[in-house]
Image (cartoon, rainbow, N blue to C red):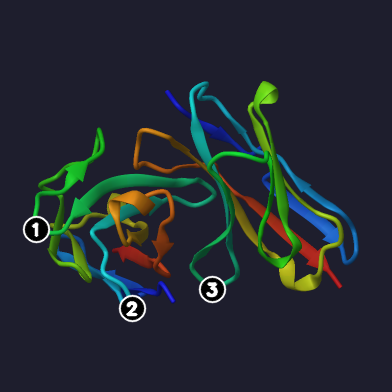
Amino acid sequence: AQSVSQHNHHVILSEAASLELGCNYSYGGTVNLFWYVQYPGQHLQLLLKYFSGDPLVKGIKGFEAELIKSKFSFNLRKPSVQWSDTAEYFCAVKRDSSYKLIFGSGTRLLVRP
Amino acid sequence: GAVVSQHPSWVICKSGTSVKIECRSLDFQATTMFWYRQFPKQSLMLMATSNEGSKATYEQGVEKDKFLINHASLTLSTLTVTSAHPEDSSFYICSASPSVESLGTQHFGDGTRLSIL
């Protein structure tokens, strides 16, 4: 069965530190990949998505993610985090032929000022 | 744009009662809406997919008689938890897509926290 793994459940960083959140998926076919963010008390929002083309995807608020097909990974990065990046981050995968989003368990990021 | 409103945000009720949760797309027409359930510290699990004017498609293991879904219009889908019991307590989230072509991009509601006593 298709699955998504986010190995970091909790991450604590100081402001200006660099961020990398891991995401691995288990499906070998054509996939679409997403990162969603959920700020405290708010709904899930799309940060970025990959459908095809350049494996380095740039999203909103300075986030980017890189698809490495050989590693089945789609890690999220930001060179310098801010206190306002404190949130929960979800990686999600969709098979190209399906409408279903499969979510990872999420990573809670706390950025200390 | 692409706002999805979910109501209520929090509900507490006695065991045995039925609870209805509404999901509305405020500024677009949603041909497809999705209902998810999230347990603490776990990922969102898709419960069912609803298309306007047709029966919902339930995921394996989800009781369709327990979780009634209605998608009567292009802007409204409802989830009714019938005869709710404490094990139904969870966080329920809906999302909506404006078209079949954009099913990969879903717009999420704020979620409903359901607590059954």
Dot 2: chain letter: B
User: The residue tagged with tag 2: helix, strand or loop?
Assistant: loop
Give the quadrant of residue A25. Answer: top right
Dot 1: chain letter: B
Q: Which residue is mark 3?
A: A41
Apparent side of residue B16 relative to residue A62 in the rendered image (left or right): left
Cα separation, mark 2 vs mark 1, equals 19 Å
A51 vs A99, nearest the viewer: A51
Q: Horizontal and vertical percent for residue A44?
A: 50, 63
Which numbered circle lies on residue B53?
1
* For residue B72, above or below residue B10: above
B105 vs A23, nearest the viewer: B105
The kind of residue on which mark 1 rests is Gly
* For residue A58, above or below residue B25: above
Dot 3: chain letter: A
Mark count: 3
The mark that comes first in sequence, 2 or 1, is 2
Cα separation, mark 3 vs mark 1, equals 32 Å
Give the quadrant of residue A56. Answer: top right
The kind of residue on which mark 3 rests is Gly
Pointer 1: residues within 10 angstroms few (<14), some, or many (20+)? few
